[in-house]
């Protein structure tokens, strides 16, 4: 049975957590394949809100095996805190598996992330300052520590010595900060964290393949999104991993033939947190309205998200680079009551029209959206469970996006709750 992938199609916070949780109902295993605790995935179940960072969004179901795969960067201190918070709410985390090959986020990664941002000044990326970029950089430099190193104190110390001999030079000589103490870091990770993480460490590749081979359903949960992808996003204003669906292959250890359904999550408008180009960004009262009504503040960092009209050029590109088989359109209810809605159907830059995402960053920065305007609807749609009850303008909006992007919209979110969605295939 091939796996299903959930992937963000914009700049993150599209509602991946909600739809992962929903689709997970019929699955056996949910796998996070990249990113770290820069993610914030919100689920609302029976009125209770859960904000997940590292633990896969299927964890709330007792029948799901949640897996943090090799492609994720894990801060063990955050993982322990998240397990404790979930346990306090009655969620059983004992089934959680963590790949021994996943890389560890170390205290110096977090410090370097913040220092690097300060160094960039006005050109900062607006990272979450969680140490994500420096941890992936160490992985690429082959000086990273992995989850499995927590099981071997001697090797852990050796690797930490090598990593800190370099990073302490950077901290003290480049940034004029204090050096980190090897013993203090080793004590925290080996004595406080390792005993809590050890029972969860597993060979995630073997586990995933055993599950697939048994004909059971596996869901791969992407964090971040297509336009935050290191290769396919608006570089350098991106994260340091590959959220695109192909990232699920590398980050979980499956081949492309092991993937079937690929669900792209798209918000009915667009948001972005952090720096970088945003062709349809709104700087007017409609932008403020979307922030207020959509509660567009970061799940983790609390930062106000930038808002704009839906961008079909982005979605066409997301359909291409992810091989989307369907789209789940979220937060359609937030558009309730607007007189009219704009959808960007192309860009214009320097007298040239672009129907597909331009590869050149200068063009993306200067792109002016070409809009088509559609009528809004005046009623509230949050309580609707059957697509036949949607106002005709809402159906027209959905069908216009489908036609522009060339991918069917199967699921539509009409509220934050687990049950607030429409399945258009029914
Ligand atoms: P993620 O990072 O992609 O999982 O998304 P976030 O959880 O960061 O942000 C999405 C926010 O929208 C969360 O607060 C969700 O509870 C909420 N949400 C998701 N789908 C819907 C929807 O269809 N309607 C409304 N009103 N809220 C939604
Ligand atoms: P979820 O999974 C939205 C953004 C940051 C910054 C850039 C790089 O909840 O959709 P990083 O800390 O990763 O080096 O920051 O990426 N970013 C996100 N934006 N949602 C996220 O996750 C994000 N994770 C990272 O704001 O612009
Ligand atoms: Mg989020």
Image: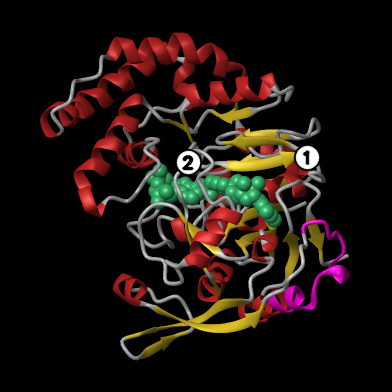
Q: Which colour scheme is used?
A: secondary structure
Give the number of the disc on residue 302: 2
Label 1 crowd bin: few (<14), some (14–19), many (20+), radius 10 Å: many
The image shows residue 150, relative to residue 141, as above or below, that is above
- Residue at which label 1 appears: 28
Instruction: Name the residue at 31% across, 38% down.
Output: 113
Q: Quadrant of residue 426?
A: bottom right
Q: Is mark 1 on a helix, strand or loop?
A: loop
Discs 2/1, front: 2
Q: What stretch is highlighted in magenta?
A: 382-397
Give the number of the disc on residue 220: none
Q: Earlier in the sequence, mark 2 or mark 1?
A: 1
Q: Disc 2, disc 1: CB below 8 Å?
A: no
118 sits to left or right of 372: left
- x, y percentage for residue 254? 61, 48
Q: What element carries label 2?
A: loop
Inter-mark Cα distance, 2 to 1 = 33 Å
């Amino acid at each position: 049975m091939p796996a299903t992938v959930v992937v963000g199609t914009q700049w993150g916070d599209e509602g991946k957590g909600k739809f992962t949780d929903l689709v997970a109902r019929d699955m056996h295993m949910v796998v996070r394949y990249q990113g770290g605790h820069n993610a914030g995935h919100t689920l609302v179940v029976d009125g209770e809100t859960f904000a997940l960072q590292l633990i896969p969004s299927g964890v709330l179901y007792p029948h799901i095996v949640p897996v943090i795969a090799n492609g994720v960067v894990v801060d063990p201190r955050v993982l322990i805190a998240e397990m404790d918070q979930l346990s306090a709410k009655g969620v059983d985390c004992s089934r959680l598996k963590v790949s021994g090959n996943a890389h560890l986020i170390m205290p110096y990664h977090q410090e370097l992330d913040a220092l690097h941002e300060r160094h960039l000044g006005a050109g900062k990326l607006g990272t979450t300052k969680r140490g994500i970029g420096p941890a992936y950089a160490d992985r690429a430099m082959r000086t990273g520590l992995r989850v499995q190193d927590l099981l071997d104190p001697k090797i852990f110390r050796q690797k930490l010595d090598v990593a800190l001999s370099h990073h302490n030079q950077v901290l003290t000589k480049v940034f004029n900060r204090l050096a980190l103490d090897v013993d203090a870091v080793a004590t925290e990770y080996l004595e406080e964290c390792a005993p809590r993480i050890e029972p969860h460490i597993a060979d995630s590749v073997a586990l995933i393949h055993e599950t697939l081979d048994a004909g059971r359903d596996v869901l791969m949960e992407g964090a971040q999104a297509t336009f935050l992808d290191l290769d396919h996003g608006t570089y350098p204003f991106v994260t340091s991993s590959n959220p695109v669906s192909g990232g699920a292959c590398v980050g979980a250890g499956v081949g492309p033939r092991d993937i079937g359904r690929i669900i792209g999550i798209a918000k009915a408008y667009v948001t972005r947190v952090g720096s970088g180009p945003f062709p349809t960004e709104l700087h007017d009262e409609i932008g403020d309205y979307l922030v207020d009504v959509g509660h567009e503040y970061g799940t983790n960092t609390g930062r106000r998200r930038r808002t704009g009209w839906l961008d079909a050029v982005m979605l066409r590109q997301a359909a291409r680079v992810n091989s989307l088989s369907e789209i789940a359109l979220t937060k359609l209810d937030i558009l309730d009551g607007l007189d009219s809605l704009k959808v960007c159907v192309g860009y214009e830059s320097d007298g040239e029209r672009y129907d597909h995402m331009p590869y050149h960053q200068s063009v993306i920065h200067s792109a002016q959206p070409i809009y088509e305007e559609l009528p809004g609807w005046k009623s509230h749609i949050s309580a609707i469970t059957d697509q036949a009850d949607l106002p005709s303008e809402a159906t027209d909006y959905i069908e216009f996006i489908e036609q522009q992007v060339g991918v069917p919209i199967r699921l539509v979110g009409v509220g934050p709750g687990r049950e607030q969605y429409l399945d258009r295939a029914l």
